[in-house]
Image (tube, rainbow, N blue to C red):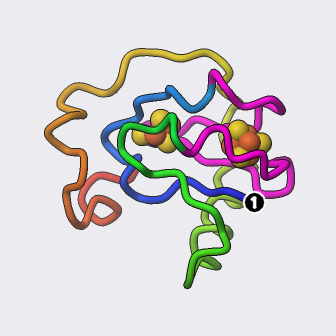
């Protein structure tokens, strides 16, 4: 599966949702997640994210992010249409400690 990590937080560019063939992105207030059981591992969303926040779970230490994505995808509504990024997204791309600072 692929997952969304903390660099999506406070950016939320949403380019990713337009390309997913199975519509498995879910939207919270300031980030998206992927449902790990619905993702078919096609990989097309990965290069679409300007914040490089979409990663394959084959990278090291991804269990935490898979569980994070699963948890919130079961609570949040699906998103299938692109929208404007959050205000200040470009300035916050790459900022450290986003989970602690901005996640809600
Ligand atoms: Fe959707 Fe493919 Fe990305 Fe999985 S890898 S979230 S199926 S676009
Ligand atoms: Fe987030 Fe990247 Fe999609 S910033 S909303 S994962 S395009």
* Residue at 53 percent of width and 51 percent of height: 54
Residue under label 1:
1
Residue at the image point whose x is 54% and y is 41% from the top: 32
Q: Does residue 17 belong to the magenta stretch?
A: no
Q: Can I make out residue 75 in this image?
A: no
Ligand 1 rendered quadrant: top right
Q: Mark 1: is the Cβ under 8 angstroms from ligand 1? A: yes
Q: Position of residue 9 (x, y in %)?
A: 37, 48
- Mark 1, Cα crowd under 10 Å, few <14 / some 14-19 / many 20+, is some
Q: Quadrant of residue 64?
A: bottom right
Above or below, 25 relative to 41: above
Going by the picture, which residue comes out furthest to the bottom?
Answer: 61
Query: Closest to the observer: 81 or 100?
Result: 81
Magenta stretch: residue 29 in it? yes
**Residue appearing at x 41%, y 58% in the figure:** 6
Give residue 60's quadrant in the image. bottom right
Task: State whether residue 81 is above or below residue 97.
Answer: above
Q: Magenta span covers which residues?
A: 18-46
Left or right, 53 with respect to 76, comes to left
Q: Considering depth in this image, is 64 or 102 the residue closer to the camera?
A: 64
Q: Position of residue 51 (x, y in %)?
A: 36, 44
User: Does residue 25 appear to the left or right of 64 in the view shown?
Assistant: right
* Left or right: residue 60 compared with residue 13: right
Q: Secondary structure at mark 1?
A: loop
Q: Does residue 6 sit above or below 84 in this rendering?
A: below
Q: Main secondary structure of the magenta part?
A: loop
Residue 10 visible? The answer is yes
Residue 31: percent from left, percent from top: 46, 42
Please give the count of numbered marks on the rendered protein: 1
The residue shown at (72%, 31%) is 20
């Amino acid at each position: 599966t692929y997952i969304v990590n903390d660099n999506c937080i406070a950016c939320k560019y949403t380019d990713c949702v337009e390309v997913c063939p199975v519509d498995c992105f879910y939207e919270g207030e300031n980030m998206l997640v992927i449902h790990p059981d619905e993702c078919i591992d096609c990989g097309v969303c990965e290069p679409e994210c300007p914040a490089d926040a979409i990663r394959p779970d084959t990278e090291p230490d991804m269990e935490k992010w898979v569980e994070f994505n699963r948890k919130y995808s079961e609570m949040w509504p699906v998103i299938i249409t692109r929208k404007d990024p959050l205000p200040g997204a470009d300035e916050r791309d790459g900022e450290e400690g986003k989970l602690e600072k901005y996640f809600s």
